[in-house]
Amino acid sequence: MWDIGLEIGHSVRSLSDCEREAEADVTVITNLLESRLIAGPESLREAMRERLSAEHIWPADRFFEAKWQEQIARHYRYNNSEYHLEPNLKSSPGGLRDIQMIGWVAKRHFGTEHYTDIVANGFMNDAELRILEPGAGLLVAGALCPAHDYRPRRRPPAV
C-alpha cells in the first residue's frame, strides 16, 4: 500500500489510552468505531468496544452534534459548494465524508454495521438507500483511487 503512496493511519494504544484519546476528540472515537480486528484476541476488541460504547463516552446526541459541527466547518472550507471545477470528492459538500457521516451517526445511535441496517431502523428508506449505495461506491472509487493522482515513487537513476 505504501508503494503506491497510500497514507495508512495506525496507532498502538492500551485500552485506557484508547478511552482517554476518544473522550478528548470526536475524530478519534470515529476512527475507533471503524476499527477492524486484523490479528489478536477478539476479547480485547470487545473490551475496547465496551469502553467506547455510547453509554460510557460520546452519547449519540453529543456525537451527532460534534460530527455536525465538524461537517459545517468542512463545508465552509469548500465554500459550501459542490460545484467546483475540480471538487474534492472526499471532503467537499456531498462528498464521501458526508456519506460516511450518515454511517457513523447511525452506528453510534443504533449500533448498525451496514446501510441496510439503517433502513431497518427507520433512519433512511429503501429509495434513499438505492441512491446512496451506488453513489458511495463511485465516490470511494474516485476519492481513493484516482488515476490522475497516482504517482509512482521516483527511483534514483541506475549507476
Image (tube, helix red, strand yellow):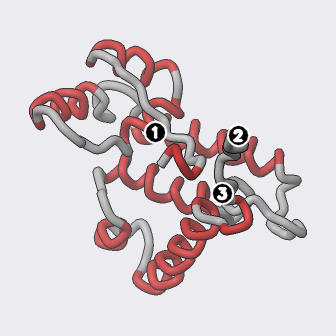
What amino acid is found at the position of numbered circle 1 in the picture? Thr
Instruction: Work out whether 133 lies above or below 96.
Output: below
Residue bearing the label numbered 2: 156
- Residues at marks 2 and 1, CA–CA distance in whole angstroms: 40 Å
Query: In x, y percent, where is residue 85?
Result: 89, 69
Q: Position of residue 71 (x, y in %)?
A: 67, 47
Write the residue at 47% across / 30% down: 28
Q: Which mark is residue 30?
A: 1
> Alpha-carbon neighbours of circle 1 within 10 Å: few (<14), some, or many (≥20)?
some
Residue kind at label 2, given as amino acid type: Pro
Q: How many marks?
A: 3
Give the number of the mark in front: 2 or 3: 2
Image coordinates of residue 50 in percent, x first then y, are: 21, 31
Q: Name the residue that disc number 3 marks.
A: 90
* Residue appearing at x 28%, y 15% in the figure: 14
- Residue 102 at x, y = what percent? 50, 58
Residue density around tag 3, few if under 14, some if 14–19, many if 20 or more, within 10 Å: some
For marks 2 and 1, give the one nearer the viewer: 2
Q: Residue at x 69, y 55 (%)?
A: 151
SS under mark 1 = helix
